[in-house]
Amino acid sequence: MAVMTQEQTPAVGSAAPDRGKGTVVLRGVTKRFEGTTAVDHVDLTVPGGSYVVLLGPSGCGKTTLLRMLGGHATIDEGEFLLDGVRTNDIPPARRDISTVFQHYGLFPHKSVRDNVEFGLKMRGLPRDARRRRADDALEFLDLTPMADRRPSQLSGGQQQRVALARALVTEPTVLLLDEPLGDLDRLLQLRMRVELRALQRRLRITFIHVTHNQEEALAIADQIVVMQDGRIQQVGRPRDVYRRPANLFTSGFMGDNNVVAGQVSAIDDGHVRVEGDGLTLLARHDATGVAVGQNLHASVRASCVSAEPAIGSGDTTSPERPNQVTATLIFLEYLGDIVKLHCRLPNGQAIVAKRAETDRTWDSLVEGEPVRLEWKTEDVQLLLA
Amino acid sequence: MSTNTSSDKSSNEIHVEPEQTAVTRRDFIKGSAALGAAAVGAHAGTTALGASPLVGAGAKRSAFPAPAFLQGTTLRVVGTGVTLLDPIKAQAEQDLGITLQYDVKDGLTAQQIAVTQPQSWDVYDQWFNSVKIVWGAGVAQPVDVTRLPEWENLSPLTKVGKINDEAKVGAGDAPVRLLYVQPDGSLGSDPTEQVSMLPLTFNVDAFGYQSDVVGSDDARSWAIFYDPDYRGRVGLYNDPATGLMDLALGAEAAGLATFADIGNMTRDEIDAILNLLIEQKQAGQFRAFWNSFDESVNLMASGEVVVESMWSPAVTALRTRGVPVVYASPQEGYRGWHGGIMINEQASGATLDAVYEYIDWWMNGWAGALVARQGYYFSIPENAREHLSEAEWDYWYGGQPAAEDMLAPDGGVVAEQGEVRDGGSYETRMSNIAVWNSVMDEHQYLVSKWNEFLSA
Amino acid sequence: MSSSSSPEAVATARPARPASESRLRLAAGSAWALLLAFPLAWLLAFLIIPVVVVLVVSFFEPTLSGFNRVFTLENYLLLAESDAFIRTLGNTILNALITTVVTFLLGFWVAYYLALVVPDLRRKFALFIIALAPFFTSFLIRAIAWIPMMGREGLLNTALLNLGITSQPLDFLLFSDFAVRVAMIQLYLLFMVSPIFFSLSAIDPAILEAARDSGAGWWAILREILLPLARPGIVIGAVFVFVLSMGEFATVRLIGGGKTSSVGLGIQNFVTYIQFPQAAAAASVLVLVTVAGVVVLFRYGRVAEGL
């Protein structure tokens, strides 16, 4: 089980396509605001050239962490190394890091070209050189026809690309993106996240992207860093975080997990048996530190629960095997690609099953009728924290 | 001219709410007529005025009956703080059974209201130097002196132009020159039975000086305004009809200018005096110009000026603050001013009757006694005398040392026992008027030149 | 029964529909007209009619007690020939320009401090109220308070004398052009601060961070970001201060003590002396010059462009 705690330095890595410049290492990085700790001893290694998404609810410290990387907030404690160089006290402009700000922070009184040129101008580049580089950046992001417009004359997606061009024109090795898709409508979000990913692949630099949207994180990241209360909860590939939430928070935040509070009743044959909330669950015994009598949570992803009409309807008291239960179908939510089955046990415990629309087993289910729910042993996650 | 021109705090503080207090007072009078004058005086003093306006006059209060037909009539009076005093208002309302609305402004503002808002007033209580302008605007009707039994007793100062045969008439707009309405509607000194403004209150003005800085020899002449010893310490009154007179008297005394008729200068004379003034101003002779009574007091009190064209109540105010200011008696003579009442062109019926009752009440002397305690004279001195104690009469009119402490209408001591009034007796002072506040023939020219002087 | 009568109902209903639509449109139109009528009536009553009246009176013949309705150019000719008026007009413009420039130079930093340095909204508000405090008292009191401050025997002169910095009281601290300018700057500073404050406050903090991120230092941020973005506020503040100082007369009268003048004071004097046509002529010239100044400010400030 891929449980990561702050004690182990979580290394983002396995999926990083390219090791090189833009490697970020954080050691015990901490930020405090009057009485609260916004970022609490964060240890993290981001290999150069990877796309990392910091994911968490608002107030979890992800934006503060990003601002510290960008140099817009001081690091109270700990160390930030960029390609092995301590970067804590280097001013923003002299870090090889650029930021795409939330709501973009475009200069409303300057043309698109002047926005993009701004960083080069501040670096003292001669007019011709900066003009050329700005035009390249504009071309790279398909903004050439808009070069002389003001930001207010552009669409949301175009504004975002201007922000990207402005950040990239100085050729950073790390690009920080603060909720870059937050201002876009849903369709544009879907398109832009593909483009962002493609851009990062083309540039081969490190992208560190902050969002509260788990779907966005899953879609775009090489590695997801889940944060809560200023601490890292889990680091992993999207599929690992999704399939194997390390703790109760991640499990809840990643959505559509059935979480059961229970007690370990037996450990045998490489299996752990958990009883609770009127259910008996059997999980693989592949984590250390599980003992009989221990209270813990178990989680089963909704899409791992299968459903069929209960045989001998009305008989919900018949003995059941583990990982199986008879419930009442309360509401069948038809969503097109998938169908969500909202079920309830006699004790009131809710269980959600998610089936593909094409899996027609759900077709014979009737709201208000008993339904037999079942899942596999390997789909049961034990949440120790 | 004198005292609080602007709608001062001092007049606001003792302000009487017209409607309510008038009614209660009238009710009180009706119900307690038998209680006698002293009690009435005490009542008015405590409820409306704080300190008694009737100090020294308790037993001699006006014996006017309140004519029944006037009950409930309201008179709107626009004028200055010199005569629009709350004790006068209270007493007149009580005696006449009318309601008075006093609109207290500085002189120029009152004049402006009189001309531009004639619908807003019934009675205009101001100074003779505004008669030409207000009469000329056609907003006033003649005062019919045959309706005023006290007219016979009015001082020759206004009727003839001088208080006795030896006195100077004084240059400029002496009241007599603007008093009588001539058959053609113009104003002149040939007696008729109609007058433009009924003359009531008057005085002479000079300048004040700080006695610890200014030598009394220097202060004998208006020429002090040009004395280089006081360069940058001279304060002036910003008004071409009055302030200029002081400066012209000074220029003449200092030998810097001459005038054929100082009260009615020619354009050349105006140019000459104003060029002199501009020159002096640019040389830094004048420290400041004031517009309101309060400003004139503040300038002297704060030490900005040591010589200032000012009104006698300002000197009194400064002395009570402990500033050693003396009011000069210049050897060239004083600048005289005379106040009075004009009647609105539109006044008629009960309102007009009330106006005549109000004027008649004024002429009866109670108010004249009250303004005497402010240092002003009254056009029928004998009537004022009836309402003054002997000691008061001797001090204010007689030029005698005060037999006892002299009290102002608000109860404050203006002169301690033994003090003598600056400038002596009524006769002495009134015989020595060099010039009157005047609106000259070339007034409009003067105004624009004066404006240039101010911006020089 | 409804089914049989429905054809007629439809037939009658058809023409009724556009009619009701047009009624609606009409109602919307008259609502708009009402909405527009109020500001228009306001403008008419408090701006256009007074200006027209002033203009008309400025061509009347003055008399001792007002004017005759006889056309004359004399009032303007007198002004044009008067060195004093020309000088006063020049001095008025100079004072207005000095006041505008100095209130900008000072006010920008006050606004900068309030908008960008003071961290939380409550403290910003508290400081703004404190800055407003002088306006809780009447103008007259504030003006009179200058005498004990700046007078010959005032605090400042006493301090300078006691410290041995001067050996004589400085007269120019009161009743001088200098004093008038200082007082006007004090008086109108807030009219400059407020619009600049609101302009600066409206700047998205991300813009400033983005500038810093791009390597802009304090000076570059001021020049490249803050000044251009504050421009609408600066221009509006400048218009406020310029217009108010052009029309100034009370400060000039009280603080100038008759030692200096303004067109406004001249107008006030003409009015108190009941010389309305001259007052109106001077006022017309003043309005013309002021409007010209405002036009220049708006042109130069390009406020209409928005940013």
Image: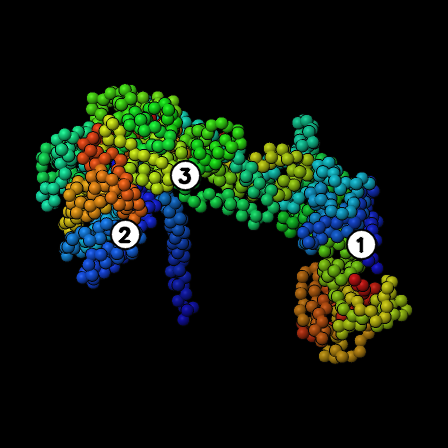
Q: Using the rendered view, name the quadrant where residue B270 is placed.
A: top left
Would you call the spot at circle 2 few (<14 residues within 10 Å), some (14-19), or many (20 or more)? many
Q: Marks 1 and 2, Cα distance to the nearest angstrom?
A: 89 Å
Same-chain check, marks 2 and 3 = no
Q: Residue at x 76, y 47 (%)?
A: A77
Amino acid of disc 3:
Ile
Amino acid of disc 2:
Ser
User: Between tags 1 and 2, which lies in front?
Assistant: 2
Q: Position of residue C244 (x, y in %)?
A: 42, 36
Nearest the viewer among B38 and C179 is B38
**Disc number placed over residue A6 in the picture, else none:** 1
The chain letter for the residue carrying disc 3 is C
**Disc number placed over residue C144 in the picture, else none:** 3
The residue that label 2 is drawn on is B52
Same-chain check, marks 1 and 3 = no
Nearest the viewer among C210 and C87 is C87
